Each structure stands twice: as structure tokens, then as C-alpha cells.
Image: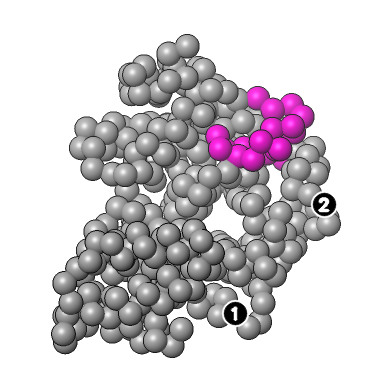
Amino acid sequence: MLFTVALLGSAGAGTLVGQASLNPTVAPRAAELARNGQRGIGTEMLSQYLATAPDDGSAWVQLGRFYLLDIRDWHLTGHPHDSPGPLYIDFGSAALDQAVRLRGDSGVILRQMLEVERALDVVEGQGYAALQHWRVPVDIAPLPSFILEMGANLLSSCPAGGIMATGGELETVAVFSVIATAGQAGGVVIVVPAYYATDARYRHRIAAALGTDSSWSVQRALASVAERRPVCLTPLVDRALLSLPGLRPMRFVQVTGPGLTSSERVVTVTDLIRADRQGSSSWLREVHEIYAAAAGFNPRLCDGPLALLGDTQIAACRR
């Protein structure tokens, strides 16, 4: 681990002495080690390789992804004291800063995911209200505009003062990044069910923000909150939450609870259309899948904002 820290600290300083040629097989081999339960060995292999081949963007992406998985495992295993914990965020950030410099795209999204992990660490340490002052540093590359657009569409679909439960990773990072950029979310409280179910520290803080009991499941907590506040579910939310009573579609989310007045803010997919034409991002398919899932429960989107994509883009709109 100390070797990795030293490597990351020096990676941006310029070409290292004795720089080796790039080996495109290293990142896939490390990924295979991780799939076989040997992520630690894969991390060390990448660290040693990048010490002599610092211009391999794919290897930096893979190393950053490993540290993202490490911080999530730290939460999942109850924050063990013999683990570096939040330092994984710093290690991963340093790796992905190099990935963004060399490749962009995937490195940018993963880098922003680490900032979400930092935000969740703030919540666990100080409570949900601390997010009012949380911002992504300005020197970190922002998410692609079509992903920020999706995050804005999700937030604009949830009534002010509501609770939003997110599903997929891309939904979560998009919503958090919009909050960090705009500095507000109409009073919406963001709940990440995957963390709520596995991390007692996070569950305790979110339960305090919701005014519920931390011993309750996320389903019970949101059902209780829905008696007094709107609860919004993003398109890829855990299927178990779809059993909440009174759910109905509202733009790009499903909503239950009182005061379900649709926002007047405009939703659009113009940035996605522009990105589709350029065809340069590996994340386009995932964004289309999120919109397709929304169209699956809200067919009216097909005659609204999603009509701009054409019926060939969203399968749910061809039914």
C-alpha cells in the first residue's frame, strides 16, 4: 500500500526514468485477477506496472476502479479499523485523475463516483445536512453534459421537499453531481438503498434525516415517510421498492405520497441527442437504458421529451 501511495503521488510529475512501453494486456489481466477474488494482487500488479508505464490510461482506469470497489467493501464490512477506509478515495482519485488526463470518458465518470463516495462519507460523519455545504472541487472534470442532463431530469421530476431513492450507479452519480453543481435540489433528500441496506452508519444518518427508525428496512422507512412527504423512485431502483403503495409515474420517476404536484422546470434530452450524433461515449447505452426504463412505466414520455430521440432509440416507445 505504501508503494501505491508513493506511485500515485509522483505519477503526474512527468515521464519516469526507465519508462517501459505500454502493455495493453495488463489492465485485462488485473481485471481477471479481481474476478477470481484476487483484487489485492491485481492492485499491486497495476501499481508496479504504472511505476514504469505511467501513460497507460486503461491501467489507471482499472486501478481507480479497484479503489472504488475497496471503499465500497469498507462500507459493506462495517468500516473495519485495520482498513485504510476513506484513504481509498484519495488513492482512487489520484489514479483516476491520471486516467482522465490520458483517456477521459470512463475515467471522468468513475472519478465523479469517488466524489459521491466522499459525499456519503460526509453524511456518515456529520449527518445529511452537511451536504448543503458539499461541493465537487472545480478542478475535477465534470460529468458529460448528457449525464448531467439526465440527473437534472430526475431531480426535476421529483416534487420539492421529496425523498428520492436511486437505483443504478449512474443515476446516483448524476443526481449527486447536479446537486453539487447547482448547490440545491429543491429540498430533495437522496437515499441510496444499497448503502442503507448494508451500512449501519449510513442507515443511522439517513433515518435521522427521514425521521424514521434506523432499525427499519428501507421499504418500511420510505413507506412511513410517504405518509407525509413525496417519495420518488428513479427508473432503475430496487424492485422491492416498487411495492410501495400508491406509486404513479411523474415524468422520469415514480412517486407516492402527498402533495404530488409536478415541477414546472423543463426536462430535455438535447444533450443526449448531441452526444448520440458524436457517438464518442461508452456511457450512451446506459443513459438510453435509464430513459427506456422510465418510458416503460410512463409511456407519455414517448410523446413528450423522448420523442426527440425517435422511436428507434427507445424500445419501450415502439410498443
Question: Under tag 2, what secondary structure?
Answer: loop
Query: Which residues, given as a range, are shown in magenta?
Result: 229-248
For the residue pair 62 and 168, the one nearer the viewer reads as 62
Q: Quadrant of residue 65?
A: bottom left
Q: Nearer the viewer, mark 2 or mark 1?
A: 1
**Does 257 sit above or below residue 57?**
above
Q: Can I make out residue 119 in this image?
A: no
**Does 236 sit above or below residue 177?**
above
Q: Can I make out residue 49 in this image?
A: yes
Question: Under tag 1, what secondary structure?
Answer: loop
233 within the magenta span: yes
17 within the magenta span: no
x, y percent for residue 97: 32, 68
For the residue pair 154 and 53, the one nearer the viewer reads as 53
Q: Residue at x 78, y 54 (%)?
A: 211
* Alpha carbons under labels 2 and 1: distance apart: 28 Å
x, y percent for residue 59: 31, 66
Q: Residue at x 76, y 43 (%)?
A: 219
Q: Amino acid at mark 2?
A: Trp
Q: Residue at x 43, y 88 (%)?
A: 2
Q: Residue 216 bears which disc, if any?
A: 2
The residue at which mark 1 appears reads as: 83
Q: Residues within 10 Å of mark 2 (few under 14, many from 20)?
A: some
